[in-house]
Image (spheres, rainbow, N blue to C red):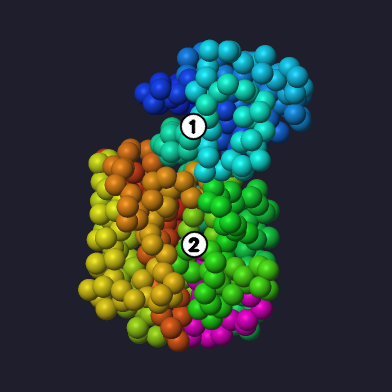
Amino acid sequence: MLTETESQQRVVRLQGMLQNKGVQAALLILPIDIYYFAGTRQNSILWIPADGEPMLLVRKSLSRAREESPIADIRPFPSSKEFASVFSGDQLSVGMTFDAVPVQQHSYYSRALPGRSFVDISMIVREVMSVKSPFELEQLRYSASKLASVFAEVPQFLKAGMRELDLSAEIEYRLRKAGHEGYVRMRAFNQELFFGLAVSSGGLSGGFFDGPVTGKGLSSASPHGASCDEIRVNEPILLDYAGVFNGYITDMTRMFVIGTLDPELQRAFDVAIDIQEMVRQAMKPGAIGEELFLAAASMAEKAGLGSCFMGMPGEQAKFVGHGVGLELDQLPVLAKGFTMPLQSGQVIAVEPKFVIPGKGVIGIENTFAVSDDGGLKLTDIPDGIVFLKP
């Protein structure tokens, strides 16, 4: 549960950035933003003035919000007639997260708060959320440990002839038993994810998901993740799952093979490990995400694997790492165009992967915390391919 001190520290950081931008208040309506600052996911909005105490207005459940949140000023959501009178009349510049606020909601609050100008504070909020406190790092370590414990059980039930779906169901069952919350929250519009994916031959299918491997899925309505294809011997099996515990997301990929592996796939895996290590060593405060991505892409190109790095040829993801926390796609991103220096406490899932047509999918992913010593590995189980007897 979010403590009063933790909540206040987050609010103060946001207030400082609002003041620097000349924004007089923030109106947060996205549930995960509210949860980050107020510690409750109840149906509510959060008003944070650039100077002063925050106010949480709750539609449902007011009683639970008061139990969960350390915010001092928690009120029932006012009627339309009373709404404007709740807020200070001199706070005219109001920030909203336009990256996640529907036009309809923006229109509603524009009418409810006449005379205010609404500005985009998406990047401000995302920057605040990107730097994890010691409390958050502990939550992420816990999430990573629970996820790793389930991955360690895979050799007990992975068998040739089982469907990708059967393998996925076994993993999801164990994750749920371990306390996985199910929601893999993402900020990006039109992206969605159910737990993760377990793919073998199905991993060679293209898909909408903005990642290097998407999987065939079960239908054109759900074209992501495990399919009904059977797992065969001598084929790579890629498991890529998000752990979600106490709201905090970690991300990990491991490779399994029943039998032996094609030498070209083994070589690609070795390159992926080398890329991961290069990125890990460079994950220090001040490093530039774009430069790390370009260095990773260069390593793949020099190995003759550039065309299949981070996805199917022609359908490649344009990153090699993404921030994680309360969302799967937080800042920072190790991608072209992201030139903001890394900061200590940011947490990044690094995932160099290859999709080799006719051969299979291969790669690695671990969640690391940025530190003065480089990336600190949170998903702490061995990286090597796990070979099983047929």
Q: Is residue 25 above or below residue 212?
A: above
Read off the residue under disc 2.
Answer: 210
Left or right: where 52 falls relative to 316: right
Q: Amino acid at mark 2?
A: Asp
- Which label's residue is closer to the chain start, 2 or 1? 1
Residue drawn at the location 53% of the way across and 17% of the way down: 91
Q: Is residue 212 above or below residue 387?
A: above
Q: Quadrant of residue 242?
A: bottom right
Which one is in front, 150 or 232? 232
Magenta region includes residue 142: no
SS type, badge 1:
strand
Magenta span: predominant SS is: loop
Q: Amino acid at mark 1?
A: Val
Q: Residue furthest front?
A: 115
Q: Quadrant of residue 169?
A: bottom right
The answer to whether residue 362 is seen in the rendering is no
2 vs 1, front mark: 1
User: x and y percent of residue 292 in the render?
Assistant: 28, 55
* Range shown magenta: 227-240
Residue drawn at the location 53% of the way across and 33% of the way down: 96
Which one is in front, 361 or 288? 288
User: x and y percent of residue 162 in the render?
Assistant: 65, 79
